[in-house]
Amino acid sequence: MTDKFLQAAIDEAKKGYNEGGIPIGSVIVYKNKIIGRGHNKRVQNGSAILHGEMDALENTGRLKASVYKECTLYTTLSPCSMCSGTILLYGIPKVVIGENKTFMGEETLLKSRGVELIIANNQECQDLMTKFIAEKPDLWNEDIGE
């Protein structure tokens, strides 16, 4: 059974896919409650930076650093360098990653800076990304800067 917070991130990823975007979702959890959620909206908003994690943080709104330091970020895919930098900037101590088989982000950097990573190896996350990459390889490469 999938953790309820990872499931919420997966639901966000599916929303993005159904909107014609890139299926990566994320939620921010503070004291066992979702305080922000989002999904990759680069296509939908014509944005250069709205990855799933960035959208979730944007939707969380301005918070004190002390709040971020008690949060867990859930994401359906291993965080890229931009999203990892933001995790480090705000001091988010724990990240739950749906899968890292289709894309390996900056996990080494995050670990080196003391961020706890939990890799769920969630098959639904992997299947969704595999399907998307096969359908829209050019869009995927654009999203990861290739």
Image: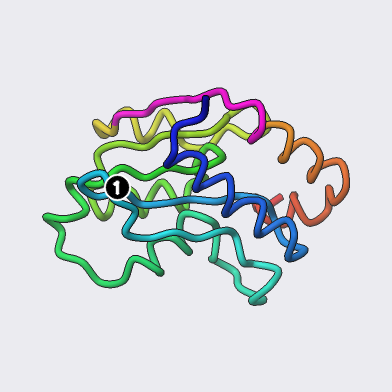
Q: Residue at x 38, y 62 (%)?
A: 57
Q: Which stretch did the figure color magenta?
A: 116-125
Q: Is residue 34 left or right of residue 134?
A: left
Q: Is residue 46 left or right of residue 139?
A: left
Q: Residue at x 41, y 34 (%)?
A: 96
Q: Is residue 59 above or below residue 146?
A: below
Q: Is residue 34 above or below residue 119?
A: below
Which residue occupies the extreme bottom position in the image?
A: 45
- The percent position of residue 95, horizontal first and vertical second, equals 37, 37
Q: Residue at x 29, y 50 (%)?
A: 33
Q: Is residue 4 above or below residue 119?
A: below
Query: What sort of colour scheme is used for the picture?
Result: rainbow
- The percent position of residue 119, horizontal first and vertical second, equals 47, 25
- The percent position of residue 132, horizontal first and vertical second, equals 79, 45
Q: Is residue 17 magenta?
A: no
Residue closest to the eye, 30 or 112: 30
SS at mark 1 in the image = helix
Residue closest to the eye, 5 or 94: 5
Q: Looking at the rendering, which quadrant does residue 93 occupy?
A: top left
Q: Is residue 63 left or right of residue 88?
A: left
Q: Residue at x 58, y 50 (%)?
A: 11
- The percent position of residue 47, horizontal first and vertical second, equals 61, 73
Residue matched to label 1: 88
Q: Is residue 117 magenta?
A: yes
> For the residue marked with disc 1, what is the amino acid?
Leu
Dot 1: within a 10 Å radius of its alpha carbon, few (fewer than 14), some, or many (20 or more) residues? Answer: some
